[in-house]
Image (tube, rainbow, N blue to C red):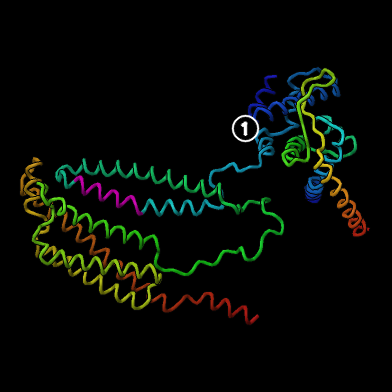
Amino acid sequence: MNLIDRYIAEVGRHLPEKSREDIEAEIGSMLEDMIDENSRQTGKPVNDEVTAAALEQLGDPKLLAYQYTPARHYLIGPDWYEAYIETLKRVLATALPVVALITLFIALARNPIDFVDAAGQAFGRVIDVAIGILFWVTVAFIIVERTDTNPNEFGSAKPGGWTVSQLPKLPKMRQISIAETLANIVFLTGFTVWIILPFVWSQGNEAVPFLNPDLWQIWLPVFFVLVVLTLIHEILKLIIGNWTQPLMITNVILCLVSIAYIIALVTTQNIFNPAFLATLSEDVVGKLRDTARWASWTVNISAAITIGIYIWDMVNSIIMAKRLNSPEPKNAIATEKMLKQ
Amino acid sequence: MENEELVQNMLLELRRGTLSLAVLSQLSREQYGYSLLKALSDQGMEIDQSTLYPLLRRLEAQGLLQSDWRIMDEARPRRYYVISTQGKAVLTKLKREWSTMAETMKQMLT
């Protein structure tokens, strides 16, 4: 009897809860019929040997259970798996560095000396956000998988139900990723707001903006003009989708102007508000000299990274524009060959 | 040797296609799982039990069979299956199709 119970429990483990009890009872009753019959035919009493023979005749309990429930035994099937992994990778790769940098920067702005604590905060926040992204992307794809009205499973397609009109269109060739452009726009807007906000807050209370107010005379207005131009350019990239000649040339000009602006700004101006640095040094145990050193260090590193990104963007757009003008000949050759045959 | 295996596999496929029809045809009188298995095998139709039992459930879910638990002849409780009205209509159609198909195959094979 023990064998039968174990067998039925194993089948039940792979059955949906709704029908489990009923199917278990049915299999139990059938098994007893089988065992009685086997024992009668062989003349042996009902013992473990006869029972085992009957169970093996019925086969692997897992497979038996699957026969009863030909439903999906997965959360995300092969139809959506690739898209799922790709989305996860992209979202994580975009969001995590931004989250890490912002957390790091805020923590360092509060307490410039404790770099270890800032790194720890950034690390913790990255883990939190990663788990959140993993969860929500997975939930989204599970919903898509369950509600997809056109599942690509074998056997579920209705005969004659498919027409050529259901073939998806080939994706339009695109050099410029939509996600990347959108991320640029969000980042640029966020960065600008982040720079302006402290000035708004500082009106009428004691908060000290961290940027030097003198910059308002020329440098910040120029910066805003550059931001607006860049945003317009990003939107054009989004619409056009490829590095056409005009798009590439305007991109190169924008990058060069931005680089020149950054170098001029960093070398000639005090970026941080002296009052802000003073409050930092009061708050924190460090001295003004340490804080000033930290400030120039932060500015120089950020400037170097930003210039690097601009140079890369420039080079990339030039290469892509060249490629666009001389399309890969693979398809042309293949077509020619087919025509000759 | 290899041919033997191929033949076995193809036979299995052939038989699988006719299973539903065979089961429906035998359930004008109500049967429980094991007695149906016996009835089929007595007439030369061997079915794996792990195929038959889930098949009965599927046919019931499609409305072609009806079933309920019952105790008969003082034996243990068993689930008895019988063909439904819808099942009878489907069976009539399938029977007709089957004779046409059998006729076609006969002509092709002789």
Q: Name the residue beneath numbered marker 1.
A: A18
Give the image quarter of residue B72.
top right
Check the residue under mark 1 and report the chain it is in: A
Q: Is residue A103 magenta?
A: yes
Q: Position of residue A253 (x, y in %)?
A: 25, 74
The answer to whether any part of residue B1 appears in the image is no
Q: Position of residue B21 (x, y in %)?
A: 83, 44
Horizontal relation, residue A37 to residue A193: left or right = right
In magenta, the rendered stretch is A94-107
Q: Amino acid at mark 1?
A: Lys
Packing grade of label 1 (10 A; few <14, some 14-19, many >=20) is few
Please name the residue shown 36% across and 53% down the image.
A93
User: Image height check: is A100 above or below A315?
Assistant: above
Please name the residue shown 35% across and 61% down the image.
A182
Instruction: Describe the element under mark 1 as helix, strand or loop.
Output: helix
User: Image height check: is B28 above or below B104?
Assistant: above
Residue at the outermost bottom position? A340
User: Image height check: is A305 above or below A283?
Assistant: below
Horizontal relation, residue B85 to residue A64: left or right = right
Q: Position of residue A8 (x, y in %)?
A: 67, 27
